[in-house]
């Protein structure tokens, strides 16, 4: 009985769409020339890298759909932007001394990373480690 109920509920559209899925559907139906129909993860969150259709502008978003960085021609990856954003959010709740990663305009990590409080620097790879 439970399986039939779940199947009927899914078929009848009882399960609500995520905010990302609703946003994507709205954008796909819009008549604007340049649109951003967001990409969603399988869990329903927003993917970090979002690019405008018909444009070379991309931006980085948080899973809830809020923006980390504004649209730019330079953004190619959000790995570093997301890492930096998480550390900044932590630093607002934790004591001074957190290491906030630096990043290039395109979202990549610079080869040289430095700790702002201590001045200690080190070489980093493309993942920031």
Image: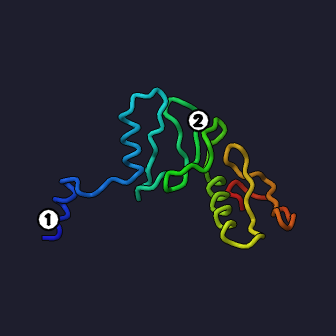
Side of 32 where 112 appears, left or right: right
Q: Residue at x 71, y 58 (%)?
A: 128
Say which quarter of the image contains residue 70.
Answer: top right
**Residue 3 to residue 106: above or below:** below
Q: Which mark is residue 110?
A: none
The structure residue drawn at horizontal position 42% and vertical position 50%, both measured from the top left corner, is 20
Q: Residues within 10 Å of mark 1 (few under 14, many from 20)?
A: few
CB within 8 Å, label 1 to label 2: no
* Element at label 2: loop
Reply above or below: 7 against 25.
below
Q: Is residue 59 left or right of residue 102?
A: left
Tell me: 30 left or right of 46: left
Pinpoint residue 10: horizontal percent, then vertical percent: 22, 57
Which residue is depicted at the point 73% across and 47% down? 104
Label 1: state its secondary structure: helix
Circle 2 crowding by C-alpha within 10 Å: few under 14, some 14–19, many from 20: some
**What residue sits right under mark 1 in the picture?**
4
User: How far is mark 1 from mark 2, CA to CA?
Assistant: 46 Å
Placement of the N terminus among the 4 image quadrants: bottom left
**Position of residue 127 measured from the top left corner of the image (x, y, whole percent):** 67, 57
Image quarter of the C terminus: bottom right
How many tags in the picture?
2
- Toward the right, the furthest residue is 119
Q: Nearer the viewer, residue 9 or 78?
A: 9
- Which residue, given by chain and number where applicable, does mark 2 sit on? 57
Q: Which residue is pictured at 71% across the width and 43% down the height?
A: 105
Q: Position of residue 4 (x, y in %)?
A: 14, 65
**Relative to the observer, which residue lies in front, 128 or 34?**
34
Query: Which residue is more in the foreground, 1 or 92?
Result: 92
């Amino acid at each position: 009985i439970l399986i039939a109920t779940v199947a009927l509920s899914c078929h009848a559209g009882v399960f609500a769409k995520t905010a990302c899925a609703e946003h994507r559907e709205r954008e796909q139906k819009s008549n604007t020339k340049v649109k951003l129909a967001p990409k969603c993860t399988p869990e329903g969150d927003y993917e970090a890298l979002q690019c405008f259709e018909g444009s070379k502008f991309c931006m980085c978003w948080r899973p809830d759909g809020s923006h980390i960085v504004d649209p730019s021609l330079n953004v190619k990856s959000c790995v570093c932007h997301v890492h930096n954003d998480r550390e900044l959010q932590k630093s607002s709740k934790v004591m001074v001394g957190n290491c906030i990663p630096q990043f290039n305009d395109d979202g990549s990590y610079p080869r040289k990373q430095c700790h702002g409080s201590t001045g200690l620097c080190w070489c980093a790879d493309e993942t920031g480690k």
